């Protein structure tokens, strides 16, 4: 018989796998001056104490140091950073074939692509300068990281 | 500022998982509506979002029309600068006629959310009418009417343990209907188990494949909450202004004139626990402060967690859905949130590795181009030295 999950939260995750794609700051791409949107200065640009200082630095010199330590090509593997401490021991992803019944399969790299570590010096290739045009009105607010207003406003199931 | 009008407790559907309790007719009066609008405008917001919720709001298109007319009159009467007004319709999508189309159509700024859980077999398993008949076919037909009227719609699918493994079918079905956005909304009240969480992860993995295919075809459809999870990494956390403050920037009003922090806390509007005031007495600041303090207990619970900055555990309505108490969460939230984060990261990792143009444009350029006052630095090519 299936067992209900605990009424209490599990032990907090002390670590989580590096997601495997760069932050916008690490990509040397952008910095938002809006209150609350400034990346953590101590991480993005150690030594800075205000968003303004960080911004100035990024505008003139590009992104600060990579906020993440170098990751091996296998970044994100559970053995490197055990997720889910105290919670469900879900099968790992990226490390077993899909037909083994695991939630996440190893996704083969595209031809010609080798997994790499993204750091501030790499950036996002082959891209033109971003345009300061208005976002598509049909899309959610461009800056919102809240998954969706419908998360709170969805019809009553 | 966001004002949610709980238009009526009545609904023409009987969804098995509805959290709003009994369906009874108590439509909001025009007087309650007008006083609610006046209250929302008191703070002179720069922007006011008026959301119609229920029950099924489109049972009362005349009320919707009256609200729109009152809003436009009330805003016109204000001195400059007047607030920008937007509208949100949360509907089951079964009641779309010519009158409704006229109300929702541009140039009025309406965001329309329609509940659709997936293909007919998934949707009709829960979303039925009073006779137990599924609602899928009628909704799909109405979506076509919306499209022909030039009304963009967003689809919301409730994800439950019994449907989690079929999320690839769900997302494929919804994407094929050409919405402006798809949102997967977990039912936090459902009986999640360790097994169903594994199914959720499998389902999200497969749904992620569907989403990636759309990107590879040049279509960057927003699929929430995966899109939001990617952004929390890109932006290194959830900005404070976007975190739930419990009535800090929004409130909901019931037909009885009672005020709640969030429409999802209303239910049958019989319990006083989460009421933060009435239209007669105004906001009960003392009670609101007590609730905010209770909600903030979750910050202590989650402070040590590595996922805190990417998780929606700050959302008060989720606490209520999960445990019935503000500030308290349980294992289901942690597992579900982690599942979404893992799935989102996997999609982003793969698409980034492929240098997928639609993904890069949507998440490394488009997403950030509109920030007021922001300065966007030019992207560098591999090997290109930093500017000095």
Image: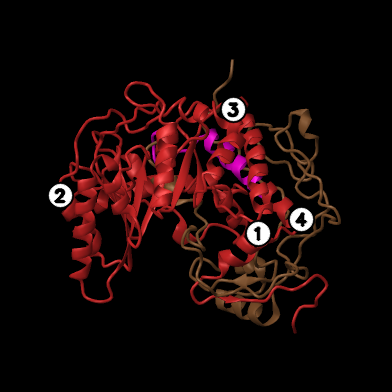
Instruction: Locate residue B124 relative to residue B355 in the image: left or right.
Output: left
Residue B231 location, quadrant: bottom right
Among numbered discs 2 and 4, the one appearing first in the sequence: 2
Q: Alpha-carbon distance for marks 4 and 3?
A: 30 Å
Marks 4 & 3, CB-CB < 8 Å contact: no
In the rendering, which numbered label is found on residue B196? 3
Q: Nearer the viewer, mark 4 or mark 1?
A: 1
In the rendering, which numbered label is found on residue B353? 4
Dot 4, crowdedness within 10 Å: few (<14), some or many (≥20)?
some
Dot 2, crowdedness within 10 Å: few (<14), some or many (≥20)?
some
The brown-coloured chain is labelled: A
Residue in view at x 18 percent, y 70 percent? B77
Residue A56 percent coordinates (x, y): 61, 81
In the rendered image, residues at marks 3 and 1 fall on the same chain = yes
Residue corresponding to mark 2 = B30
In the rendering, which numbered label is found on residue B358? 1
| The colour assigned to chain B within the rendered structure | red
In the rendered image, residues at marks 2 and 3 fall on the same chain = yes
Dot 3, crowdedness within 10 Å: few (<14), some or many (≥20)?
many
């Amino acid at each position: 018989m299936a067992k209900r999950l605990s009424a209490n939260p599990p032990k907090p995750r002390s670590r989580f796998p590096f997601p495997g794609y760069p932050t916008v700051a690490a990509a040397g791409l952008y910095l938002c001056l809006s209150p609350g949107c400034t990346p953590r200065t101590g991480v993005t640009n150690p030594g800075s104490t205000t968003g303004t200082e960080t911004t100035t630095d990024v505008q003139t010199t590009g992104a600060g140091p990579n906020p993440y330590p170098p990751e091996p090509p296998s970044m994100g593997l559970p053995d490197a950073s055990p997720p889910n401490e105290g919670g469900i021991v879900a099968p790992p992803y990226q490390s077993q074939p899909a037909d083994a019944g695991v939630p996440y399969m190893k996704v083969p790299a595209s031809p010609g692509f080798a997994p790499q570590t993204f750091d501030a010096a790499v950036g996002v290739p082959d891209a033109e300068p971003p345009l300061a045009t208005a976002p598509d009105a049909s899309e959610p607010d461009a800056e919102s990281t809240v998954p969706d207003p419908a998360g709170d406003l969805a019809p009553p199931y | 500022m966001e004002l949610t009008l709980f238009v009526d407790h009545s609904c023409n559907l009987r969804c098995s998982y509805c959290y709003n309790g009994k369906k009874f007719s108590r439509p909001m009066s025009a007087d309650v509506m007008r006083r609610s609008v006046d209250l929302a405008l008191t703070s002179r917001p720069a922007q006011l979002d008026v959301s119609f919720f229920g029950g099924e709001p489109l049972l009362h298109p005349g009320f919707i029309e009256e609200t729109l007319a009152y809003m436009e009159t009330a805003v016109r009467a204000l001195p400059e600068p007047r607030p920008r007004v937007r509208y949100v319709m949360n509907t089951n999508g079964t009641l779309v006629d010519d009158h409704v189309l006229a109300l929702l159509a541009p140039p009025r700024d309406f965001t329309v959310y329609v509940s659709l859980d997936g293909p007919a077999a998934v949707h009709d398993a829960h979303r039925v009418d009073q006779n137990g008949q599924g609602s899928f076919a009628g909704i799909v037909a109405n979506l076509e009417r919306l499209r022909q009227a030039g009304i963009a719609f967003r689809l919301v699918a409730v994800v439950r343990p019994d449907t989690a493994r079929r999320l690839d079918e769900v997302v494929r079905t919804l994407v094929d209907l050409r919405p402006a956005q798809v949102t997967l909304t977990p039912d936090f009240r459902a009986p999640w188990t360790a097994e169903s969480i594994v199914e959720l992860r499998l389902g999200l993995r497969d749904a992620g494949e569907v989403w990636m295919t759309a990107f590879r075809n040049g279509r960057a459809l927003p699929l929430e909450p995966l899109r939001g999870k990617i952004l929390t990494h890109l932006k290194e956390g959830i900005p404070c202004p976007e975190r739930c403050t419990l009535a800090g920037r929004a409130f909901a009003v019931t037909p009885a004139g009672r005020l709640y922090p969030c429409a999802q806390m209303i239910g049958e509007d019989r319990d006083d626990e989460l009421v933060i005031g009435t239209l007669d007495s105004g906001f009960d600041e003392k009670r609101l402060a007590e609730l905010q303090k209770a909600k903030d207990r979750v910050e202590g619970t989650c402070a040590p967690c590595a996922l805190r900055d990417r998780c929606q555990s700050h959302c008060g309505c989720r606490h209520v859905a999960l445990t019935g108490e503000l500030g308290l969460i349980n294992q289901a939230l942690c597992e579900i949130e982690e599942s979404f984060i893992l799935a989102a990261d996997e999609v982003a990792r793969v698409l980034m590795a492929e240098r997928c143009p639609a993904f890069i444009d949507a998440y490394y350029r488009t997403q950030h181009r509109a920030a007021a006052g922001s300065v966007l630095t030019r992207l560098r090519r591999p090997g290109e030295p930093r500017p000095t």
